[in-house]
Image (cartoon, rainbow, N blue to C red):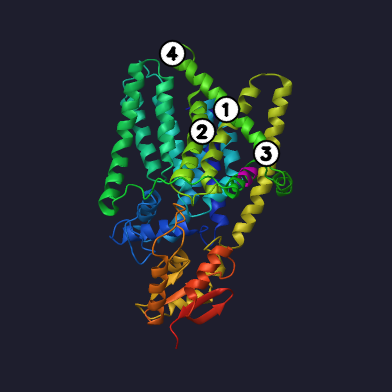
Amino acid sequence: MTKQRAASFLILGLLAALGTFLTLYATPQGLGLSDDSIAYIAGARSILSGQGYREAWLASNGPVTHFPPGFSSILALIGVSGLDPLRGARFVNSFLFGANAFLLGLIGWRMTRSQVAGILLAALFVVNASLFRTHAVAMSEPLYIFLSLAAFLTFNAGMQERSVASNSKLLDPRVWLIATGVLTAFAYLTRYAGLALFATFVVALLLLQDTWRKRLTSAGIFIAGFLPFVLAWSIRNKIVADNATNRILVYHPLTAENLGTGIYNFSEFLIPVEAWRRGITKDPNGLVIFLSLIALALLVWITYKGLKKFFQPASERPEILFFTNALYIFGYLASIVSSMMLFDASTKFKLRILSPIYVSLLILLVLLGHWLWNRRAVLWRAVVVSAAFFVFAFSVYDISSIITKLHKGGQGYASFQWYDSEAMDFLRQLPEGIRIYTNQPGPVYLYTNRPSYVLPDLIDPVTGLPREGYDSGVNALQQDVLAGNAVLALFKFGSEAEDVQSIYINISEGLYLAHNVRGDKIYTAYP
């Protein structure tokens, strides 16, 4: 290894260490928590207890199928050392932020054959506020991004011609393709959106290989690495819960509110200065047109390069890492849009959902800069240097404010408003055996160490369809509370939408209000 290569690896290692340190510094009280975060943590605790992957945050304690087991399994593995998954998640995602920066550096280096480009890509990742916030929450996206980046690297190696002078099995493309299949399966077992990664590699193999024999053979090898793990998980789910992924095919169109959320989150990624972002999002049509033009240009390029290689196998193969990442953007978007419209109405264009696209966009951005730099014109090189400077400078400004804000206190359910809640203290003091019905089963489990029951609801948030048995469910809940066997805990009463608030009023009607502090209400039997 030359001194220059060694120095490049050292710089990438330092950037990875910086990313890990920044995440740890920004989360002294732990990662941000959401309902899904608590589901992963409870699932990990259930695995550690020997009960398997179950819904420990709910009194039903049924087997988990809605969330794949990857992230919870990693937390459980860390928990073997004695570290509770709640605390372990902080170290896992902090390490993954650094590891993802390192892998991106390798991808940029390999893609452009430029060590400087690889280092720049890793640095841009570390200072990107959107991707930093993704890693500062106890969610599965950081692990999914890590597995995806590793899969891109192994796929790139699998598409290279084997060196005739070497007999090493490690250089055999088939080994790399099997590794890609395994990594893609692990990505799927971390997030079901991993199917988009699977589709990306299959399409790339069919388009970019020279002959039908190579296309079918390489695709078969890749699928052989992918299929066993996915089948095992699906069979498990079918046995324990009579469904493969807890998804039901029901059409529900995208809402204007959901699209607005996506536009705003894209603006946060693209525009690091809040004042500029507010100005642009007042009239988002310009941003939509800009994003559409970028998407159209990428789509035309992918279609042209892919079909040209497919129909003219002797033509030059497009750069593998660039082509697969561009293809993956469309595959991933198609995956989440189809999920929103056909399987899960509760999925929104939130930051964590869009974060894998952001990573691929960073990769494409650096390759574009490298391509312009190689035009060797003074003007283009000045543009590249200026753009890199301003993007990096504004990103540092943006992330510094995010880190300062996160360092002050926990986010989401990790906030003091939850762990210092008087309502939680009231619930902790309830006699053992008293059931808890609540609109917040996640934080109730987290801060009382007691599973709870969800409330009856008129609409299923996943399918968007009316639920059956609402009236009988409300009646059963009220009778259970009035008999002294349960309590009803409603958090943030009065802050929900009007339709949700009407349900709370209906459910609590006729019950005794035993606790009412800061909008948190707990109803019991009459004293």
Residue identifier under label 1: 298
Asked if disc 3 and disc 1 are in contact, CB closer than 8 Å, the reply is no
Q: Is residue 33 above or below residue 259?
A: below
Callout 1: 10 Å neighbours few (<14), some, many (20+)? some
Q: Which is the main secondary structure of the residues drawn in magenta?
A: helix
Q: Are marks 1 and 2 in contact (CB under 8 Å)?
A: yes
> In screen coordinates, is 65 left or right of 274?
left
Mark pair 4, 1: CA separation: 21 Å
| Residue that mark 2 sits on | 330
Is label 4 in a helix, a strand or a loop?
Answer: loop
Between marks 1 and 2, how big is the CA–CA gap? 9 Å
For the question of whether residue 81 can be seen, the reply is no
Q: Earlier in the sequence, mark 1 or mark 2?
A: 1
Q: Are marks 4 and 2 in contact (CB under 8 Å)?
A: no
Question: What's under tag 4, amino acid-wise?
Answer: Pro
Q: Which residue is mark 4?
A: 313
Please state the extent of the stretch shown in magenta in the rendering.
263-267
Dot 1 amino acid type: Leu
Real-space CA distance between mark 4 and mark 2, rounded to the nearest whole angstrom: 24 Å
